[in-house]
Each structure stands twice: as structure tokens, then as C-alpha cells.
Image (cartoon, rainbow, N blue to C red):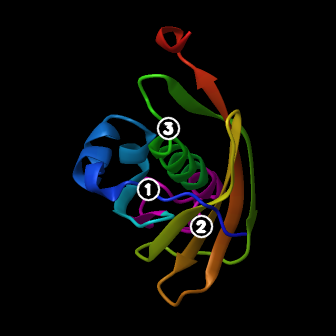
Amino acid sequence: MKSELWFDRTNIRVDLLNEYGKNTLSEAIGLEITEVTEQSVLGKLQVSSQNCQPLGLLNGGTSMAIIEILGSVAANLTLDRQIFVAVGQSIQGSHFRPAKLGEWVFASAAPLHVGKKSQVWEVSILNSEDKLVCKGSITMAVITLNNGK
């Protein structure tokens, strides 16, 4: 589905997005935002002892966290943050293949629906061979902040 959404990339700095994620789950699992394109937010993560399960494979919860984080960042980049904030309302994901300890995974969040009260973002997580590891979506509720009345 093509959206009419276009990020104003002139005011988006990836280094500041990653700085904003310091001391949060993003940093704990090792997720790094790498790029904001005209219609997506991209990130990468290396499978490590911080984000894998006992068999040395990417933990499914880590994949769900990637969906939550990239979808949330993307949704909030579409809003005037002086007036609105987008918060996670529902998340779902399906796991297709494992990613092993030491491997890199690459994720992208793209809009399915960007409305005034809700947004839906689809996130794909691929391995270095461009094979699908996990795919999911997050529904975001758009809330008016108190100063937006």
C-alpha cells in the first residue's frame, strides 16, 4: 500500500535518534537506527548474548522489540511532537527463520496507515542474505498532549 507520507528528512538526524535511545531497551538489545528514507526508518542489530535465547538464536522477544521500537520512532517522526505523541497499542509478529549468534539483522518500518488517531506500521527483519527472519506490525494510538488541548 502506498502512503502519501513523506518524512521531512532535512530535520531528522539519525545520531540524535540513537542518542534519544540511550539507556532504553534500544541500547540494551543493541538496536541502531541507521537511516531515515522518504518513507521508512531502517535499523540494524547484531545477534549477541544480550538479545539471543539459550540456543544462541535471536530471541523472538528481541524481534518484537525491534518492531515496537522502529514502528514507534517512525510514527512519532510523522507528528508535531509539541502537540501529539504516538504510543504502542497493539503489536504482532511472525517468525520465519532463525538468526544465529554473531549474525546481523536489518529491519525497516514502512507505513500501512497513517491517520489522525491511529497509525499502522509494518516492520520486516531480514538477515544478511535478504531472507525474512521476522515480519510484524504495530498499531500506534495518536494522543493529543495537554498543551495541544
Query: Quadrant location of residue 28?
Result: top left
Residue at horizontal 59 percent and vertical 63 percent from the top? 110
Q: Residues within 10 Å of mark 2 (few under 14, many from 20)?
A: few
Q: Does residue 70 belong to the magenta stretch?
A: no
| Tag 1 residue | 7
Between the residue at mark 3 and the residue at mark 1, the CA separation in whole angstroms equals 10 Å
Q: Does residue 77 appear anywhere in the picture?
A: yes
Return the x and y of residue 92 as percentages of the image width and height. 76, 52
Q: Secondary structure at mark 3?
A: loop
Between the residue at mark 2 and the residue at mark 3, the CA separation in whole angstroms equals 40 Å
Q: Amino acid at mark 1?
A: Phe
Q: Which residues are magenta?
A: 41-64
29 sits left or right of 52 in the view: left
Return the x and y of residue 140 as percentages of the image width and height. 67, 39
Query: Quadrant location of residue 67?
Result: bottom right
Q: Nearer the viewer, mark 2 or mark 1?
A: 1
103 sits left or right of 123 in the view: left
Q: Does residue 17 sit above or below 59 in this rendering?
A: above
Q: How many marks?
A: 3
| Tag 2 residue | 55
Q: Secondary structure at mark 1?
A: loop
| Tag 3 residue | 79
100 sits left or right of 9 in the view: right
Q: Does residue 72 sit above or below 58 in this rendering?
A: above
Q: In which quadrant is the C terminus drawn?
A: top right
Q: Amino acid at mark 3?
A: Leu
Q: Nearer the viewer, mark 2 or mark 3?
A: 3
Query: Between residues 19 and 7, which one lies in front from this camera angle?
Result: 7
Q: Does residue 117 sit above or below 69 in this rendering?
A: above
Q: Residues within 10 Å of mark 1 (few under 14, many from 20)?
A: some
